[in-house]
Amino acid sequence: MKKSDILVIAIVIIVLLPFFIFQPVYDVFCTLTMLYPLWMAFLKFGILATFGEMLGQRIKTGQYHHKGFGLFPKFIVWGLLGMWIALAMSVFKVGIPAFMEKASCFAGVTDAMKSDFTWLKLAGAFFVSVMMNTSFAPVFMTVHKICDMHIAEHDGRAVSLIRPVQVGKHIQNLNWDVQWNFVFKKTIPLFWIPAHTLTFCLPGEFQVLFAAFCSIILGLFLSIAAMKKQ
């Protein structure tokens, strides 16, 4: 274990510990999440998803950060994507249960999604997760990959945030073999659908936060995908 690993572990403990020790810190977090859901989603994903990519870099290169990584651009991109995810989660967790009540025998699933854990809530969470991960997730993952390629093209500089994204060029250069056979076919059914099923079983104020924590795992997946490409 390197000194950088010890430092990272210490920082994580220092940041997270107050939420478990001091009730006012936890209460402020919940209040801000309720009052400013999109801005809080920006911060949660900006911090946690970027940290996930740094962990991926640690696995791949032995370092958390290197020249050209693009820490600030990645933070901004992940923050914006986090707001998009928060909006998508709000739409799916309302729309899918409403459809289930009309089209099937899942009577009461809409109310169950707002209450404590029940088997009916688990069923609703599962269907929400399946629909979100088979429709929204592939588009989201592809958009993120294009943004990541755009940042890399500009050597991680902040100017990448204002330069036009060459979408057509990046789509052509995207490794669709890895994107389809690993990112889509393996991570979605084996990780994301179960993970988001659990996400939608949680209380509302923790759903986006847990999804952001899951994005740390995404950083590891991205690292694995990069190594598979090589």
Image: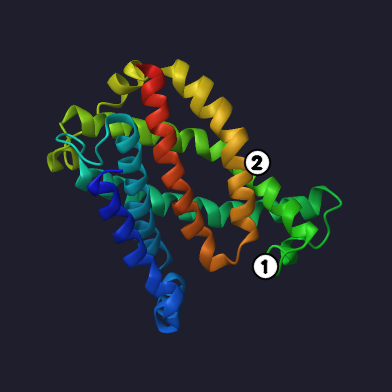
Assign a secondary structure to mark 2: helix
Viewer-closest of 124 and 14: 14
Figure quadrant of residue 172? top left
The residue positioned farthest toward the front in the image shown: 1
Q: CA distance from mark 2 to mark 1?
A: 19 Å
Marks 2 and 1, the one that precedes in the sequence: 1
Residue 160 showing in the rendered view: yes
Using the image, determine if residue 121 lies above or below residue 25: above
Assign a secondary structure to mark 1: loop
Q: Position of residue 114 (x, y in %)?
A: 67, 67
Q: Position of residue 26 (x, y in %)?
A: 44, 76
Task: Say whether residue 133 is left or right of residue 160.
Answer: right
Residue 31 showing in the rendered view: no
Q: Amino acid at mark 1?
A: Lys
Using the image, determine if residue 126 lies above or below residue 119: above
Q: Label 2 belongs to which residue? A: 130
The answer to whether the residues at label 2 and label 1 have Cβ atoms under 8 Å apart is no
Q: Label 1 belongs to which residue? A: 114
Q: Residue at x 28, y 29 (%)?
A: 149
Q: Which color mode does the image show?
A: rainbow
Q: Residue at x 82, y 54 (%)?
A: 106
Figure quadrant of residue 32? bottom left
Q: Position of residue 103 (x, y in %)?
A: 81, 48
Task: Say whether residue 105 is left or right of residue 91.
Answer: right
The residue positioned farthest toward the bottom in the image shown: 24
- Quick one: quadrant of the C terminus? top left
Q: Position of residue 45 (x, y in %)?
A: 38, 53
Q: Amino acid at mark 2?
A: Val
